[in-house]
Amino acid sequence: MTSFLHLDAEWCGFEQAGAVVLPVPYEYTTSYGKGTEGAPEAILRASHYLELYDEELDVEIYRLPKGIATLPSMSFDETSGHDQEAVALIDGQVARLIEQGKFVISLGGEHTMSIGAARAHTRHYPSLSILQLDAHSDLREEYYGNRYSHACVMARIYEFNPDIVQVGIRSQGAEEAEFIRKKSIKMFYAIAIKQGLYDREGKSWHDAVIDSLKENVYLTFDCDFFDPSLIPALGTPEPGGFGWDETIAFLRRLAERRTIVGFDVNELMPVSPFISPQFIIAKLIYKLIGYVFSKTPGKDKSA
């Protein structure tokens, strides 16, 4: 089994580790480029080449949660591993880990996998916002007749937790735009962010997004939030995305002001000969673990 970071045994045991990585190679409804089922393994392998010390936090990040364990990859078969059944399997696995006191990082796979992970966290944390960083709003009621398509993930999440906040969106259908208006979805379009519409009175879009969130936050990170010039290995790449520095700065501020209770990363589509996308995403995960578990002086969670 490939593990995250390939840590020494004393730092990757399940009992000790405060954080666990759950590979969820689910792919059934991808609509353009395909191959997200290979993302968890590619990201895990790339993580072996990360430096463990982080100069920003001045620590070897894996020490902060007392270790990071990697669980066996989930499996999905033809008879019981699609759509609603797959979501239920993911929900159950994530719920068991939360009940054991673990911080769960679910590693997809297509975006549909986020429904189960978000549902498990919503049950455990009643006052919870779902923060979606993504190029697509994913609010279709169905797509090609499938209500569990990757294009419908946030519509399904809305059914059990309507407190969703969408950031970076730059591609959607007319029916999704209407749903957003009708349901008053908290939306931060990429174009509005980049035009500086939230930069006022000494505050930035970071503050506007965070102010719209409850204290507890579950983060679902679609890799196409990044611009395809940085992450070209995407099934549906959308121009006008975000860079590394601005994304990392936002995530650090988010962790300082809110409690991130879990997160998933999805929709990477490894493509040969590119190796940088999976390496960058592995580093994103490692940095985010650091922000979540960092106890730096002056940490401010005020609203």
Image (cartoon, grey):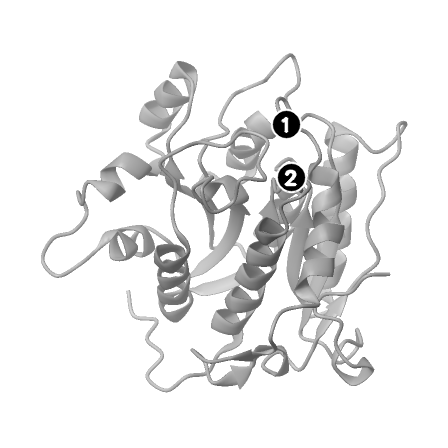
Q: Residue at x 35, y 36 (%)?
A: 240
Left or right of 30, for residue 224: left
Label pair 2/1, CB-CB below 8 angstroms: yes
Q: Which mark is residue 269?
A: 2
As drawn, 141 above or below 224: above
Report the Cα–Cα distance between label 2 and label 1. Answer: 8 Å
Where residue 105 sits, quadrant-wise, is bottom right
The amino acid type found where label 2 is placed reads Met
Q: Position of residue 71 (x, y in %)?
A: 80, 61
For marks 2 and 1 on the same chain, the one whose residue lies earlier in the sequence: 1
Which residue is found at the position 67% from the left and 51% from the top? 107
Side of 98 relative to 152 (left or right): right
The quarter in which the N terminus is drawn is bottom right
Placement of the C terminus among the 4 image quadrants:
bottom left
Q: Residue at x 34, y 23 (%)?
A: 182
Answer whether residue 263 is visible to the viewer in this image. Answer: no
Q: Say which residue label 1 marks.
A: 33
Residue 213: x and y in percent read 37, 53
**Relative to 27, does residue 199 appear above or below in the rendering?**
below
Is 279 positioned to the left or the right of 224 in the image?
right
Q: Residue 46, position in %: x, y?
A: 68, 60
Report helix, strand or loop for mark 2.
loop
In the displayed structure, does residue 56 sit left or right of residue 24?
left
Return the residue found at the far left: 201
Residue at the spot 54% in from the left edge and 33% down from the top edge: 159
- The extreme top residue here reads 145
